[in-house]
Amino acid sequence: MSPSEKHDLEAGRDVEVPPHSPSSLDLDDTDTDTEVKRAHDLRNKVTILRGLHKGEAWLDKVCGVETQGIDRIPEEKKQPPSTWNIFLMWWSLNVHVGVLPLGLLGPEFGLSLRQSIASAVIGIILGAMTTAYTGTLGPKLGMRQIATSRYSFGFWGAKLCSVLNIVVGGGFGVVNYVVVGQILSAVSDYKLSITVGIIIIAVISYIVSIFGFKLIHTFEKYSWIYTFILLSVLIGQAAPHVELDHKGSDGNSGLLYAGSFLTIVAINFSNASGWCSIASDYYCNFPASTPAWKTYLLTFWGIVIPTTFSVTIGSCIGNAAVTAAYPPYADAYDEHGLGGLIRAIYHPVGWSKFCLVLLTFSVLGNNIAINYSSGLSLQLLGHYFHAVPRFIWSLAFAIVVAVLAIAGQQNLSNVVEDFVSLLGYWTVSFTVILLIEDRVFRRRDGYELTSWDQPNKLPLGIAATTALLAGYLAGGVTGMSQTWYIGPIAAKFGGGGGDVGIYLSGVITAVWYSTARYVEKKYSGR
């Protein structure tokens, strides 16, 4: 190989590199007016930004706070944890009390226990496939997930992905905060308001999240273990009142049953696929030589197994409280929500309160990841945002989510049903676009990694943005089934409708993007 050539492991191809030009493995700024360079110049010029970054550097020196931000990580600067962390981190993100409401929705929709679990597992498997695929781009490109989307959405279109990613994180955060608020209220014999509990968990989650990649991977590797044990005890104590053969109110056939089944599939798909826009945030430090199949399988099973475990427990206690309507459980759930139900299941009272306190911290792994990735997404909105340290954006995000959780604390089921299922309409389109770009349009040409923050070298993004909107408007809106709106196609199932928006969104996005991207690339050359 000649001196002017380098093998680009991250892009998976051989590339021609002119003599004396920076290779795609270099992170140093060039004379090109990149986003990184503009952000660095801005933080040096503005006094308050300069002070914030000095403070961040001091925190890094004293406490080990991550200062990396959204900059691409070249191969020689990567500091990978164990590959098994890919598998284990998802256990902490999905084995916690914030996942239980997803299981409770099946019984609330009139499904039997078997139907609830079956529909949930189908949704989890489909959703995990999307997150597993997008995660494979992290080691290869050394970039955060939304940054990788710039190679299809372009510099400006990726900003829309950043906003949607922040909204996704906010939705998950609201659910977690409210559940923890209910639990802490139950521990105090309902003397402590849910609002106080929300504030407590918001503060703790933020503080841990600012330490960044290394601490998050270490924390997530182990934090799920005690929660797994406590949830196993929970289902053990609830088991005598779970009625496996109790039929759901929607029966076993007909449009009403099909509609409820499809809606639960959609909600669980949305939950499992909700990570597709952040997976690479935690994989970008792994070497480019990491086999894509290994990243995919570790991610897939890392999501499917723990999520199925948590959702199944949610379905079982929902069966006892809603379907079988065991009086102590039904009363506790009606009056005090999930926190009251868990308190009623654990016994005696002293043991119950002890378990509730421990379960309060089970959502930390999930909240930490959400705060961390949302801060990165805010930085990706442009060089003005990039110039502000991540820990400031994570703080702003935590405050907003806490306020929303306080406002929606009395309507947790509606938040889960409406908000979480809405996520799937965009996550399926996001994944389809990245998949087609990577496997079709980049299969031969690869990625020019030094162009990730140069708008004039990235795709126009028209094809991706319009494909995303087409999938959402033509597929998601017509096929959605929400409390506040039922699309014309979803309404065909009768009753509360059947959510088929994710399937329609995926198909429409695939057809639109394949055609539009070909035209865009042919006439723009990028």
Image (cartoon, grey):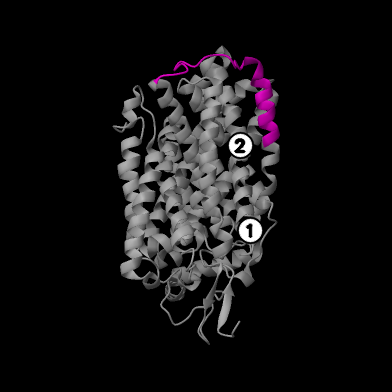
Question: Is 230 left, or right, of 49 in this rendering?
Answer: right
Residue 298 makes an appearance in the image: yes
Residue 145 x, y percent position in the rendering: 50, 57
Nearer the observer, 196 or 313: 313
- Tell me the tag on residue 291: 1
What is the quadrant of residue 320 in the picture? top right
From the image, which quarter does the N terminus lie in? bottom right
Question: Is 223 left, or right, of 326 in this rendering?
Answer: right
Residue 205 x, y percent position in the rendering: 57, 47
Residue 413 makes an appearance in the image: no
Q: Is residue 476 above or below residue 244?
A: below
Give the residue displayed 43% in from the left and 32% down from the top. 417
Q: Is residue 102 above or below residue 56?
A: above
Span of residues in magenta: 228-254
Give the residue displayed 51% in from the left and 42% down from the top. 127
Number of numbered callouts drawn:
2
Q: Amino acid at mark 2?
A: Thr
Q: Mark 1 vs mark 2: which is more N-terminal?
A: 1
Q: Which residue is mark 2?
A: 360
Magenta span includes 246: yes
- Tell me the tag on residue 232: none
Give the residue displayed 59% in from the left and 42% down from the top. 303
Residue 115 x, y percent position in the rendering: 52, 23
Secondary structure, mark 2, is helix
Secondary structure, mark 1, is loop
**Neighbours of disc 1 within 10 Å: few (<14), some (14-19), many (20+):** few
Q: Amino acid at mark 1?
A: Pro
**Neighbours of disc 2 within 10 Å: few (<14), some (14-19), many (20+):** many
* The residue positioned farthest toward the left in the image shown: 488
From the image, which quarter does the C terminus lie in? bottom left
Q: Is residue 410 above or below residue 162?
A: above
